[in-house]
Structure formats: structure tokens, C-alpha cells
Amino acid sequence: MDNLIQIKIDDEQLENIRLQLHGVAVSEIERVKNDVKDPSPFVKKNETCKYLHISNNTLDKMIILGFPKITVGGVTRFDKREIDKWLYQHNE
């Protein structure tokens, strides 16, 4: 017995799915390219802003909302792995 389910979607929905998949693929490729260039998962604040394509002020607001950071001896770093987890958990 085949357990096939058929779902009918219109062209607009199909294009929307394609765009979302493309966005995820491009994002993951960029993330991997960045990891290859710099194997360290820990980045400075300005590097975090570049990684996320956001401003310093936006990052400050995200930190208030619980964005993961590590501070040791007054030096703050951000773990790219934790950044990715946090973003996926807070995806709307």
C-alpha cells in the first residue's frame, strides 16, 4: 500500500516555497563559507553585526532580548553556533 499524500498548491504558493528554500540555501552556503575562512566560532561584536547583516543598535536590542553572548574579564564574544540556534528558535 502506498502512503502517498498529494497536496495541490497554486503557482504563487509554489514560487513562495522556492524563494524560501533559495533563501535558506544561500544563507547556509554563506555560513559555511564564513566558517571555512575563520574556523573559530567566537566573534567580536562588529563581526557579529557583519555576520547577521545588522547594525550595532539592532544587536544591542537583541542582546536585551536574550541574544547569546559570552563575557570573560570584560571582553565580550559571540558564538556563531549559539547565534544560529537562537535565530532558529526565535524565527517568526
Image: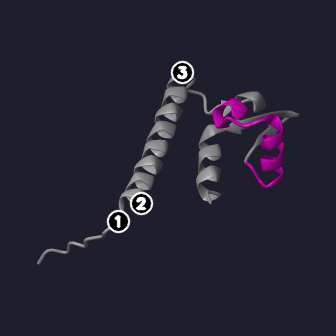
Callout 3–callout 2 Cβ contact below 8 Å = no
Direction right: furthest residue: 74
Alpha carbons under labels 1 and 3: distance apart: 40 Å
Q: Quadrant of the N terminus?
A: bottom left
Q: Nearer the viewer, mark 3 or mark 2?
A: 2
Q: Which mark is residue 9?
A: 1
Q: Is residue 7 left or right of residue 24?
A: left
Rendering coords of residue 29 (x, y %): 46, 34
Mark 2: amino acid: Gln
- Magenta stretch in the rendered image: 48-67
Residue topped by disc 3? 37
**In the figure, 53 relative to 18: above or below?**
above
Coordinates of residue 58 in the picture (x, y in percent): 79, 43
In this rendering, the answer to whether 29 lies above or below 8 is above
Image quadrant where residue 14 sits: bottom left
- In this view, the residue farthest toward the top is 37
The verdict on residue 59 being magenta is yes
Residue 30: mark in rendering: none
- Which residue occupies 47% across, 50% down? 20
Query: Under tag 2, what secondary structure?
Result: helix
Q: Secondary structure at mark 3?
A: helix
Q: Is residue 21 left or right of residue 58?
A: left
**Along the line of sight, which residue is nearer the eye, 75 or 21?**
21
Which residue is pictured at 53% across the width and 34% down the height?
31
Badge 1 crowding class, 10 Å Cα cut-off, few under 14, some 14 to 19, many 20 or more, is few
Amino acid found under the numbered disc labelled 3: Lys
Residue in front for this viewpoint, 43 or 31: 31
How far apart in space, not on screen, are marks 2 and 1 (Cα)?
Answer: 6 Å
Q: Residue furthest bottom?
A: 1
Residue 87 location, x and y as percent? Answer: 63, 51
Sequence-wise, the earlier of marks 3 and 2 is: 2
What residue is shown with label 2? 13
